[in-house]
Image (cartoon, rainbow, N blue to C red):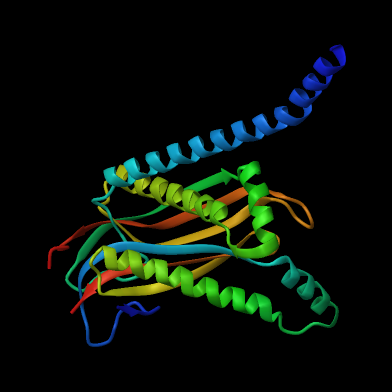
Amino acid sequence: MIEFLLSLLFVLLFVLGPLLLAAAGVAVGWIVEANHFRRLEEGERQLGHLVVSDLKQLPENWAASDASLVCGEAAIARDSLKSFLAGLRRLVGGRIRAYETLMERARREALLRMLRQAQAAGANAVWNVRVSSSAVGGGERQKTFGVLVIAYGTALKVRGTEA
Amino acid sequence: MIVVNTEYVPGQSIVEVKGLVQGNTVRAKHVGRDIAAGLKNIFGGELRGYTDLLIEARREALGRMVAEAERLGANAVLNVRFATSAITSGAAELYAYGTAVVLQ
């Protein structure tokens, strides 16, 4: 009987334990990501009136003033359990959705912070936007911690947007 | 849908600026390709598997960008830019962005 109980304890501790931890990790990562997307959508809705473009020049009939540089940065860590699943995916090749959403979150966050800065400056448009990204940490044969995105552009006060 | 990487389309003027549109994709080739690429590394030469990977990724990223522009009611995407990043070894991200506009 004692032996049975001990083996049951062993199974619980060393087999179910890690599985439960992994499941909890996946759930937490999923909740964090869903919350982030919700916050992004809310922010984008609030700043939806700003006209954002990567063009250098304004359309001919527009007039602009008060130009200033605005930037937004975001560093998002990768979810280690999702990275593990992505690693498995790499064996067979194809799309890696876990990383697609990671990059999307980082980019939208950086663009959103840029827009907040533009709004604080009283602008209603951001022109010549550029987006650049890189991985944080890593190096030869080492894992990276996450991704870094910087978005920058020129905030402007424009008139004559209704042609 | 006109997709160009110039600031304007000759003979047409911008009627409305719909805003920034973007598309991305992260892709990997199966591990066999990675090993083959490692071997190729000894003598040099084109890594055809990864060239295909990039072509597929470019189509996908552009496709998503265009889909977003269509959703906004634009008929052209101007000043398209591409950016790549290496998130992890063996996988590449391709990101395309541009300005969705209505041309006339």
Pick the front one: A64 or A114: A114
Farthest top residue in view: A2
Q: Residue at x 25, y 70 (%)?
A: B74
Q: Do we see residue A80 in this rendering?
A: yes
In percent of width and height, residue B102 lies at 22, 72
Q: Quadrant of residue B75?
A: bottom left
Q: Residue at x 23, y 51 (%)?
A: A49
In percent of width and height, residue A23 lies at 61, 34
Q: Residue at x 63, y 79 (%)?
A: B51
Q: Is residue B78 above or below residue A132?
A: below
Farthest front residue in view: A1
Farthest left residue in view: A163
Q: Is residue A54 left or right of residue A107?
A: left
Exactly how many numbered labels are in the figure? 0
User: Split into 4 quadrants, where in the image is the N terminus of chain A?
Assistant: top right
User: Split into 4 quadrants, where in the image is the C terminus of chain A?
Assistant: bottom left
Pick the front one: B71 or B79: B71
Q: Is residue B33 left or right of residue A94?
A: right
Q: Is residue A7 above or below residue A25?
A: above
In percent of width and height, residue B35 lies at 79, 70
Q: Is residue A57 left or right of residue B47?
A: left
In percent of width and height, residue A52 lies at 32, 59
Q: Residue at x 36, y 63 (%)?
A: B21
Q: Is residue A116 above or below residue A99?
A: above
Q: Do we see residue A145 in this rendering?
A: no
Q: Quadrant of residue B54?
A: bottom right
Pick the front one: A56 or B55: B55
Q: Quadrant of residue B15?
A: bottom left
